[in-house]
Image (tube, rainbow, N blue to C red):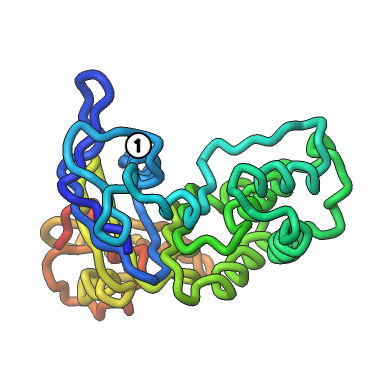
């Protein structure tokens, strides 16, 4: 569906993406990486907003800038999303329908369906300026899914959402995922674990990993130890303290260690696998 071939992008002398190669089919992908890793730049290149210095993005084996169907099939939520504050939410959705070329006869049903998906149907008549930041973010998700797009690119969609809104987002993705390519850029590992079939890990503009969630977890197999703080210094070789927690009045360190230790290892999480990759504990 989407192919990224040898993609590089620079701003001035700073190269932000380095020879990225991806093939993305009808699945839900999590794009994981720290702030500044290149996630937003990659998504903007995939949406056709940035022209790369090298390489290309293809949609059904055709360059996106030559494709007649790509922009009609695209739903996109940028990281920084805003709306016309004086319009009502319904009027803003009508405007997005017009930009997407959705026939007027279908606008009402499409808008209702999208707003219901993000639990904003009761806010359709409210002006944008009266909505909270979380509501505007949900409205951004709604405009991205207007018109039943086949390719959905979401850049930090859960930023600013409270736990119940994040849960609603996960349900929305679950309802949408049939026969679509959905790419969710985030630094929140729990969102990827809950929503995605596959994971792409990017660090300093390079793809470190592209595979299933289970494969990413397995990178940390036999490398995770939950150790009493007093024993932490007994972990040998290259290591990284991932988390410090308290249980029954005692302090424990969750440690990623490159070498096998004398302690019993823990079952790895997606975050363990991700941190092993970016910290070089592989």
Of the pair 131 and 76, the residue shown nearer to us: 76
| Quarter where residue 226 is shown | bottom left
- Picture coordinates of residue 13 (x, y %)? 20, 20
- Picture coordinates of residue 222 (x, y %)? 20, 76
Q: Secondary structure at mark 1?
A: loop
**Residue located 24% across and 75% down the image:** 218
Q: Is residue 224 visible?
A: no
Residue 168 horizontal side relative to residue 144, left or right: right
In the displayed structure, 197 sits above or below 201; it is below
Query: Could you classify mark 1 by the number of other residues whose Cα lies within 10 Å: few (under 14), some (14-19), or many (20 or more)?
Result: few
- Picture coordinates of residue 211 (x, y %)? 26, 69
Q: Quadrant of the N terminus?
A: bottom left
| Quarter where residue 262 is shown | bottom left
**Residue located 41% across and 65% down the image:** 181
Residue 136 horizontal side relative to residue 87, left or right: left
- Picture coordinates of residue 252 (x, y %)? 40, 64
Count the labels in the image.
1
Q: Is residue 252 visible?
A: yes
Of the pair 76 and 217, the residue shown nearer to us: 76
In the displayed structure, 245 sits above or below 35; it is below
Residue 180 horizontal side relative to residue 22, left or right: right
**Residue located 29% across and 56% down the image:** 201
In the displayed structure, 154 sits above or below 50; it is below
**Residue located 47% across and 63% down the image:** 150
Residue 54 horizontal side relative to residue 139, left or right: left
Residue position marked by numbered label 1 in the rendering = 36
Of the pair 151 and 15, the residue shown nearer to us: 151
Q: Quadrant of the C terminus?
A: bottom left
Residue, far top: 12
């Amino acid at each position: 569906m989407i192919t990224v071939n040898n993609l590089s992008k620079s701003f001035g002398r700073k190269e932000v993406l380095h020879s990225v190669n991806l093939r993305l089919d009808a699945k839900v992908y999590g794009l994981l990486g720290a702030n500044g890793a290149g996630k937003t730049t990659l998504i903007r290149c995939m949406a056709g907003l940035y022209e790369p210095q090298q390489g290309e993005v293809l949609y059904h084996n055709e360059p996106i800038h030559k494709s007649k169907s790509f922009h009609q099939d695209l739903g996109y939520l940028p990281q920084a999303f805003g709306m016309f504050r004086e319009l009502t939410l319904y009027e803003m959705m009508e405007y997005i329908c017009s930009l997407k070329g959705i026939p007027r006869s279908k606008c009402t049903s499409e808008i209702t369906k999208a707003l219901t998906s993000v639990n904003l149907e009761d806010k359709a008549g409210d002006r944008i300026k009266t909505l909270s930041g979380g509501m505007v973010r949900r409205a951004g998700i709604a405009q991205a899914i207007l018109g039943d797009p086949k390719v959905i690119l979401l850049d930090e969609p859960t930023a600013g959402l409270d736990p119940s809104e994040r849960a609603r987002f996960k349900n929305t993705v679950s309802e949408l995922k049939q026969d679509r390519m959905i790419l969710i850029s985030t630094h929140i590992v729990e969102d990827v674990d809950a929503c995605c079939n596959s994971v792409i890990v990017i660090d300093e503009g390079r793809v470190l990993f592209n595979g299933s969630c289970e494969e990413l977890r397995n990178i940390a197999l036999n490398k995770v130890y939950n150790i009493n703080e007093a024993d932490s210094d007994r972990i040998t070789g290259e290591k990284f303290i991932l988390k410090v927690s308290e249980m029954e009045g005692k302090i424990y360190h969750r440690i990623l260690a490159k070498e096998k230790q004398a302690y019993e290892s823990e079952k790895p999480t997606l975050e363990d696998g991700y941190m092993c990759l970016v910290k070089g504990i592989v």
